[in-house]
Every structure is written in C-alpha cells, then in structure tokens.
Amino acid sequence: MRPALLLTCCLLISAAPAAQKQPNQQSKEEQPSCESAKEDLEKYLGTFSRSCRVDSDCEGYYYRTNPCDRAVVVRKHKLAGKRERRLLALQQRAGEACTLKWRMRQACSPIPFRATCRRNVCLDTMTAAPEASRKEVR
C-alpha cells in the first residue's frame, strides 16, 4: 500500500468521529463546502512540477482525499516542511468537509496508474485523463 493512500485513509477515518462529536462547533459559513475544499486541494496539487525528461522522472501519488479518485501524476519529489504541512492541512480540510457526503458510499480500490513522460510532461497514460490528452496534443 502506498504511504500517501494510507495517510489519506487515516485522515478520513479520524475526521469522521470529530465531525460527529462537534457538529455545531463551527458555523456553516466558517466550514468550507465539500466542493470548495476539494477545489482548493486540486489547485494546490496543480502547483506540483510535472516537468520530466524520461519516464523514471514521474510518479503517481494518491494525494486526493477521495480514495476513489485517480492518482496525481507529477515529477518525483519528497514533501517536507511547509509544502507537506500545506498538503496535509488541505487534505484534512477536504476530508472533514466531505465526511457526510462520503460516509454512505461503498469502499473502492485505488485506480491504477502508469506514470510516463510525454513531451516533457508527466502524464498518467493508463487512465488517460481527457484534460491531459488535450494538453499533450497542443
């Protein structure tokens, strides 16, 4: 099991009891919606470098809070310091905001990926995301 997936699962599991114990701690205005929290996480993931020269420069990471989502394919890196803390905070925020929405869904396995370098950009060629293929054609 990949460490990021394990971390994501732990965050989701720990967020569920906290959301149930303290439902009225924050007003609805203070707590972000599930969609806006996921959007903030996606924007942050978009800042990760995707530049590459060879396939071995790329790797997939399960950074999204929904385990049913595909991996984020970016240049290999080690998260540390501020970037890691920011990622963890955004993951936790999205996990807490989406707990009620995701509580009743079925479990799913991580979507497999194939991280490859195409035209100096890391892409997942196994799931062939439509936006990635459009960027590759340009």
Image (cartoon, rainbow, N blue to C red):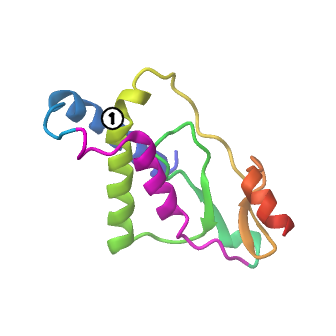
Q: Is residue 120 left or right of residue 77?
A: right
Residue 10 in sight here: no
Front residue (pair 1, 25): 25
Task: Give x and y (percent) for residue 15.
Answer: 28, 38
Q: Residue at x 67, y 67 (%)?
A: 58
Q: Residue at x 32, y 57 (%)?
A: 89
Q: Is residue 84 left or right of residue 75?
A: left
Residue 20 in sight here: yes
Is 29 placed above or below 76 here?
Answer: above
Residue count near mark 1 (Cα–Cα under 10 Å), binned few <14, some 14–19, many ≥20: some
Front residue (pair 76, 18): 18
| Residue sitting farthest toward the front | 29
Q: Residue at x 62, y 45 (%)?
A: 70
Q: Residue at x 56, y 36 (%)?
A: 68
Question: Is residue 85 on the magenta stretch?
Answer: no
| Residue sitting farthest toward the right | 137
Q: Which residue is mark 1?
A: 13
Q: Which residues are magenta?
A: 28-52
| Residue sitting farthest toward the bottom | 53
Displayed quadrant of residue 133: bottom right
Task: Give x and y (percent) for residue 97.
Answer: 34, 40
